[in-house]
């Protein structure tokens, strides 16, 4: 397991390494002492865990965290520092930090628990992400449209099947398009209703919309639902005056 230990204090690196060798002998730990070390380490390939100090001569823990999450969004990160504050801890957690441990002798024992927890959470996130990808692939394969929208009716996400039915190729186009009452009647409880829309090829298509209000992972309320065709698309009526 490849682990980056980001700390420019050699004495602190020795102490952290001692704890890691006691509890995680299978770790392959790389010392990161400067910005160039971090750049080379990230360029070298995947990383399984990062342990970083906050106060660095060349940067700080928040900036390091953001760089890691930008390159490796699923990589667990633990901040082990003696110079942080509660405000820093909160900001780091919002930026994706997995855990925060005070760098002092009486807190060294908690480092093991923080690392164990961070690795478990990373495994859980990877499992959920994989299941979600498979679920999305299945829905696309069987022709089920899926969407998420704000309570005000702004789409936050939609799968390719639904966007294809509505004749759009991106979320921005979907938000700008006329949905023809697609979200009408979708409220706190799961409900279903039919709606007729102009399809991608100009034909009329009748869709069954089923959805309701739920709480998203970020705590906000969203509308989630699925869309199914009620009947095959019917030919578009000819314009008046055509022969």
Image: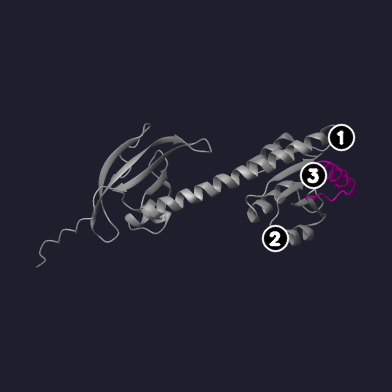
Q: Secondary structure at mark 1?
A: helix
Q: Are marks 1 and 3 in contact (CB under 8 Å)?
A: no
Q: Most prominent secondary structure in the magenta stretch? A: helix
Disc number for residue 105? 1
Specify whether residue 83 is painted magenta. no
Question: Dot 3, how many residues are within 10 Å of its Cα: few (below 14), some (14-19), or many (20+)?
Answer: some
Q: Residue furthest right?
A: 11
The earlier-in-sequence mark between 2 and 1 is: 2
Residue assigned mark 3: 24
The residue drawn where x is 43% and y is 51% is 138
The residue drawn where x is 24% and y is 54% is 232
Magenta residue span: 5-25
Residue assigned mark 2: 45
Q: Is residue 98 visible?
A: no
Image quadrant for the C terminus? bottom left
Disc number for residue 46? none
Image-quadrant location for residue 99 = top right
Q: Is residue 29 visible?
A: yes
Mark 2 and mark 1: Cα distance apart in space: 33 Å
């Amino acid at each position: 397991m490849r682990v980056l230990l980001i700390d420019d204090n050699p004495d602190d690196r020795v102490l952290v390494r001692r704890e890691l060798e006691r509890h995680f002998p299978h770790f392959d730990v790389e010392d990161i002492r400067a910005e160039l070390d971090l750049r080379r380490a990230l360029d070298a390939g995947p990383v399984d865990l990062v342990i970083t100090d906050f106060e660095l001569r060349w940067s700080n823990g928040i900036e390091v965290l953001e760089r890691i999450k930008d390159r490796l969004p699923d990589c667990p990160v633990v901040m082990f520092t003696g110079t942080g504050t509660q405000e820093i801890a909160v900001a780091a957690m919002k930026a994706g930090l997995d855990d925060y441990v005070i760098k002092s002798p009486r807190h060294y024992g908690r480092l093991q628990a923080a690392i164990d927890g961070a690795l478990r959470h990373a495994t859980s996130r990877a499992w959920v992400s994989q299941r979600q990808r498979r679920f999305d692939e299945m829905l696309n394969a069987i022709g089920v449209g899926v969407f998420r929208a704000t309570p005000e009716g702004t789409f936050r996400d939609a799968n390719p099947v639904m966007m294809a039915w509505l004749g759009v190729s991106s979320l921005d186009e979907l938000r700008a398009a006329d949905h023809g009452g697609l979200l009408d009647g979708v409220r706190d409880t799961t409900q279903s209703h039919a709606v007729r829309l102009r399809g991608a090829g100009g034909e009329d298509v009748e869709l069954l919309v089923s959805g309701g209000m739920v709480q998203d992972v970020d705590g906000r309320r969203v509308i989630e639902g699925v869309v199914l065709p009620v009947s095959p698309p019917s030919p578009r009526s000819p314009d008046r005056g055509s022969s």
